[in-house]
Amino acid sequence: MEKEENSSSRIKKENLEKKPKQTEDKLSEQTENKAEDSSKKNELSSEDKIKDLEDKLIRAYAEMENQRRRFEKEKDDAFEYGGFAFAREALNLIDNLVRSKVSLENDEKLKNTEALKKTTEHLDVIYKDMISILKKNNIEEIKSIDQKLDPNLHQPMMEVDDENKEPGTIVQEIQKGFIMKDRLLRPTL
């Protein structure tokens, strides 16, 4: 029996010696697994970081490209429509010229005089020259009499019932409208 006890105690001893080794092995294996998992997470997060940085880089490049296009368009527009404000102011000169002519023609003292004829002829020459200068710079009059109302080009001031005209047709022009290339400089009134 003693042998059995000795053998049993020896087995227990061996088991006890093995258990710490097994426990150590299991712990080291678990630690290695955790390290592998954490390195995988780091790898994944590194991959995610790379993808995120690539995405940011692509977006930054696209934004720079869009900004370059905007600047290019603004530069082209500035070159093409640089005289827009000047042209708008020049229209006031034409309006004043037309008003002066109408005022002179309606003056009772000057009616049917040679001075009025010469003056209106000169005013007509100046008007035609100014319109010619505008045309050379791609500024055109908007044709409106007997045209259908276009709210993009015409600004109606009143509506007149005329049985001879279709509804929405312009019958009178108070002030001429002009366009510069494809932009409205001033609507027709």
Image (tube, rainbow, N blue to C red):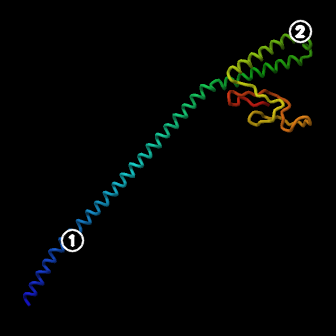
Question: Which element carries disc 2, helix, strand or loop?
Answer: helix
**Amino acid at the residue labelled 1:** Thr
Compute the Cα span from label 1 to label 2.
126 Å
| Residue 118: percent from left, percent from top | 85, 10
Percent of width and height locating residue 101: 83, 18
On-image quarter of the N terminus? bottom left
Extreme residue in the left direction = 2
Q: Secondary structure at mark 1?
A: helix
| Residue pointed to by mark 2 | 114
Q: Residue at x 23, y 69 (%)?
A: 26
Residue beneath label 1, please? 23
Q: Circle 1: is it few (<14), some (14-19), or many (20+) Cα within 10 Å?
A: few
Q: Residues within 10 Å of mark 2 (few under 14, many from 20)?
A: few
Judged left or right of residue 186, residue 20 is left
Instruction: Give the amino acid type for the residue marked by disc 2 in the picture.
Output: Glu
Q: Quadrant of residue 178?
A: top right
What residue do we see at 11% from left, 83% from top?
9
Sequence-earlier tag: 1 or 2 = 1
Judge whether 96 appears above or below 43 on screen. above
Q: Position of residue 139 (x, y in %)?
A: 70, 24
Q: Quadrant of residue 32?
A: bottom left
Residue 150, located in which quarter of the rendered image? top right
Residue at the outermost top position: 114
Q: Residue at x 88, y 35 (%)?
A: 165
* Quadrant of the frame with the C terminus: top right
| Discs 1/2, front | 1
| 83 up-or-down from 15: above or below | above
